[in-house]
Image: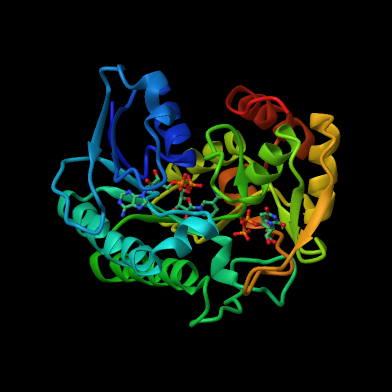
Amino acid sequence: MKRILVTGGAGFLGSHLCERLLKEGNEVLCVDNFFTGRRSNIVSFINNPLFEVMRHDVCFPLYVEVDELYNLACPASPIHYQFDPVQTTKTSVHGAINMLGLAKRVRAKIFQSSTSEVYGDPQIHPQPESYWGNVNPIGYRSCYDEGKRCAETLFFDYNRQHKLRIKVARIFNTYGPRMHPNDGRVVSNFIMQALQGKPITVYGKGHQTRSFCYVDDMIEAFIRLMATPDDFTGPVNLGNPGEFTILELAEKIIKLTRSKSKIIFEPLPHDDPTQRQPDITLAKKKLKWQPKINLEDGLKETIRYFRKLAPAS
Ligand code: NAD
Ligand code: UDP
């Protein structure tokens, strides 16, 4: 049995990861400041004797004894990470320093949830890990993008300087049950709007693309990455290469929910990337992994979850 720390463990991805690690018989310590995380995400396993929750902000040092550490703490939705941008950078940078320091003290293996945002508005398509990105350092998204880039730098310096065992995942848009209904991300927004019969808010012309990965596929990749030999550090792209325009996503969700909602167009947010698709050649090779759940099936599961939360229109 391993003792595993998951920061951001009450969030969307973190709660699924905690659940999976518990199922495998590990002891799990969930550390979260509940900024976007919710008790309801962890309620189904909160009484498991192998599970422990601690309210703590990763911007402050933490002293615990663990064998492995997954660092997921950081708001992921643009609305939430732009709410207090200084805190967002602190969470990524001070959070990484504190968690790397902890991992160094106890010689734990440490996983970083980095992001496709390190590629910014990419000029290479699809994006391989070797691409250095096209990121605005002073824009509205920079607190998140540059915070995550700096965290990657710290991870690789701890690896080179202190021989720390690191695993860096660049996560592309992931969706599924337990996303916050008011999270502001596109899948949750569109499903909530469709279920409530409200207009579907497509930003810009909706021609921008994203590649959407279902949460179960993503958690499987996390586990496989953590189990790779020590000389494999990443960064490795994790995501579903299926690429869709935002307009296509809106139409799909209207069809699957049988909603009467109409699409409306709203201004495109600052620095909104025009296209995004992971090149997952490396993940296929090193993790023997590729997503299995297609967008339609993943959306059906996610719609089922949101139906329980949203009053019918
Ligand atoms: P989320 O907002 O649901 O979860 C983030 C969790 O971190 C929440 O529980 C929040 O309360 C917690 N948190 C935030 N600041 C904290 C702090 N200072 N101290 C302690 N806890 C803190 O988002 P998510 O989608 O589950 O994302 C998890 C991780 O994966 C994030 O690091 C995010 O950047 C990364 N990621 C997610 C996606 C995606 O599509 N879901 C894509 C790329 C990267
Ligand atoms: N988007 C949209 N309507 C919404 C929410 C988002 O058209 O109600 C668009 C957004 O402009 C972006 C894409 O959907 O082009 C994905 O947005 P999200 O916030 O989910 O994640 P991002 O990949 O931009 O971080």
Report the quarter where the C terminus lies: top right
Q: At which x and y percent is residue 199?
A: 77, 46
Q: Is residue 252 above or below residue 142?
A: above
Residue ID at (48%, 40%)? 13
User: Is residue 264 left or right of 212 when viewed as pictured?
Assistant: right
Tell me which colouring the rendered structure shows: rainbow
Q: Is residue 33 above or below residue 116?
A: above
Q: Is residue 8 above or below residue 88?
A: above
Q: Quadrant of residue 217?
A: top right
User: Is residue 132 left or right of 233 when viewed as pictured?
Assistant: right
Q: Nearer the viewer, residue 130 or 88?
A: 88
Q: At which x and y percent is residue 286?
A: 57, 50
Q: At which x and y percent is residue 142?
A: 49, 74
Write down which quadrant ligand 2 falls in.
Answer: bottom right
Residue ID at (56%, 65%)? 117
Q: Is residue 44 above or below residue 4?
A: above
Residue ID at (32%, 71%)? 157
How many numbered tags mark residues here? 0
Residue 169 seen anywhere in this rendered image of the structure: no
Q: At which x and y percent is residue 84?
A: 39, 64
User: Is residue 134 left or right of 33 when viewed as pictured?
Assistant: right
Residue ID at (40%, 49%)? 72
Q: Nearer the viewer, residue 137 or 157?
A: 137
Residue 262 seen anywhere in this rendered image of the structure: yes
Report the quarter where the N terminus lies: top left
